[in-house]
Image (cartoon, rainbow, N blue to C red):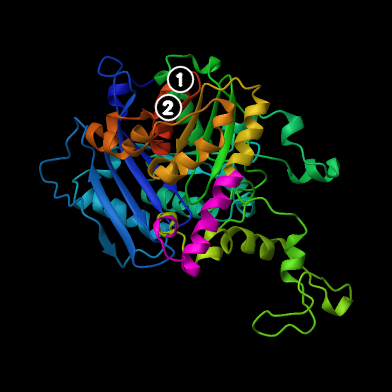
Amino acid sequence: MSSPSDRGLILSVNSGSSSLKISLFRVLSGEQSQDPVELILESNTTSLTSPPAKFTFTISSSSSSAPPPSSQIDSSEISAEEISDHKSALAFFLKHLRESAGYNEKDIKKVCHRVVHGGDYRKPVVIDDESYEHLEKLSDLAPLHNGNALSVIRTTLEALPHASSIAYFDTAFHSTIPPHISTYMIDQNIAKNRGLRKYGFHGLSYAYILRTVSEHLSKPQSQTSLIVLHLGSGASICAIKNGQSLDTSMGLTPVSGLPGATRAGDVDGSMIFHYLARRGGEDDSGDDDDVGRMSHEKLQGVEVHVTRAEEILNKQSGWKSLMGTTDFGTIVQRRNAALSSSESPSADQDLAVLAFNIFVDRILTFLGSYFVKLGGKVDAVVFAGGIGERSVEVRESVVKGVECLGFGIDKGKNEDVQKKREEGGESVKVVDVSAEGAREKKVLVCWTDEQYEMARECTLEQSFWN
């Protein structure tokens, strides 16, 4: 059994749909810190689906473990034409770690991988032939993420054969969802044989937020009930009752629930047939006197395959389909311009207002439902994720919509969230933006950290180190 001081380094790898985030941690002994690990450096590769990829490599401002003296680290963003996918992004990072930061790859003892869909896995697992094969079978349920994670895992096993690779699953946090919520009203023989049920996602983020917010509230996790909004390009919301996931907006796959950058969110299940149906008389412009009618003639029918339907709902929908952009910040800017202008808004501005209002409306639909499911006993509504952390307007609009439930937001505090974060640095994990008259039901902003959550859990799980 090894002691914390001789465990070496932990690498946390987070494969997104078009990004790769990597953090390097050092294991701490109990005497040095309440935290079991310390962040040394982190890297972020973005725009993997729209080259050239952009790469950053940054030393943690709070790290006491400086890189070797020979290191030459440039923290500015660089374009990396040699990066074409997640596999090459990991190889580029390892090269940078060795040549620029001066770290010996053999000091990395564990590699933690975020895997979106874990099926029936309720705990993290060490990657071996059996677990890898099982994860391959689950890729169809999370095509934007699992396939990328598996390619990174393969590369890691080849590049770091001395290190154990461990898979951490976003679905595991939601294993506490009761059957009456996770079960779909379909033939149960088919459902059980094919694993068709609600799984939920963003679990690593929710686990981090639950622990961090309960500490902020000075309450045990087992007594903490929250409604957490993880809002980003992929967005979801979770009801946490007494420290356990009760319900969440995503289901069998991440495509259901809230809309996102390229995801439709909840839609009528039969809509896809109408979407793809061949309609007589339709020209290239899409104009048709019979719009909205689906022919029942066999020749006009369309065989809709799961892969084609999921491609549309997962990658060709969301605010990209409405606005032509996956950048929610652009939508907010155009929406604000439309609201502040004395002139008639442009077509783009009108669409921006629509996209923004749809997003807020869907959030309120779930938030109100979860408030009822929790019996009104909610310690806080928590905003997280890129949009949740940065969008003053989304937070204000959402909280305004639930003022009737006893929540309120302080305008000044809400506008100063980023300033507080910049002034306090990484030590600022939670900011309270609650209105003075609504203190019993708090509104919080939390900076989630999935890489830290994996490294922390890895360090504390003794079986991984025996």
Q: Position of residue 80 (x, y in %)?
A: 29, 64
- Tell me which residue sits at (45%, 20%) in the image: 439
Q: Quadrant of the C terminus?
A: top left
In the image, 143: left or right of 338? right
- Residue 455 found in image quarter: top left
- Tell me which residue sits at (47%, 63%) in the image: 349
328 or 125, nearer to the observer? 328
In contact (CB < 8 Å): disc 1 and disc 2: yes
Is residue 360 located in the magenta-colored stretch of the structure?
A: yes
- Tell me which residue sits at (82%, 71%) in the image: 294
What is the distance, in whole Å, between disc 1 and disc 2 at their CAs? 6 Å
388 or 14, nearer to the observer? 388
Q: Main secondary structure of the magenta part?
A: helix
Q: Secondary structure at mark 1?
A: loop
- Tell me which residue sits at (41%, 61%) in the image: 342
**Residue 466 visible (yes or no):** no
Q: Position of residue 66 (x, y in %)?
A: 16, 36
| Residue type, mark 2 in image | Ser
The residue labelled by disc 2 is: 434
Is residue 361 located in the magenta-colored stretch of the structure?
A: yes
Q: Is residue 373 above or below residue 16?
A: above
Q: Is residue 411 above or below residue 438?
A: below
| Residue type, mark 1 in image | Arg
In the image, 285: left or right of 15? right
In the image, 97: left or right of 216? left
Q: Quadrant of the N terminus?
A: top left
The residue labelled by disc 1 is: 439
Q: Residues within 10 Å of mark 2 (few under 14, many from 20)?
A: many
Q: Is residue 14 above or below residue 459?
A: below
Q: Secondary structure at mark 2?
A: loop
Highlighted range, magenta = 338-362
Q: Which mark is residue 37?
A: none
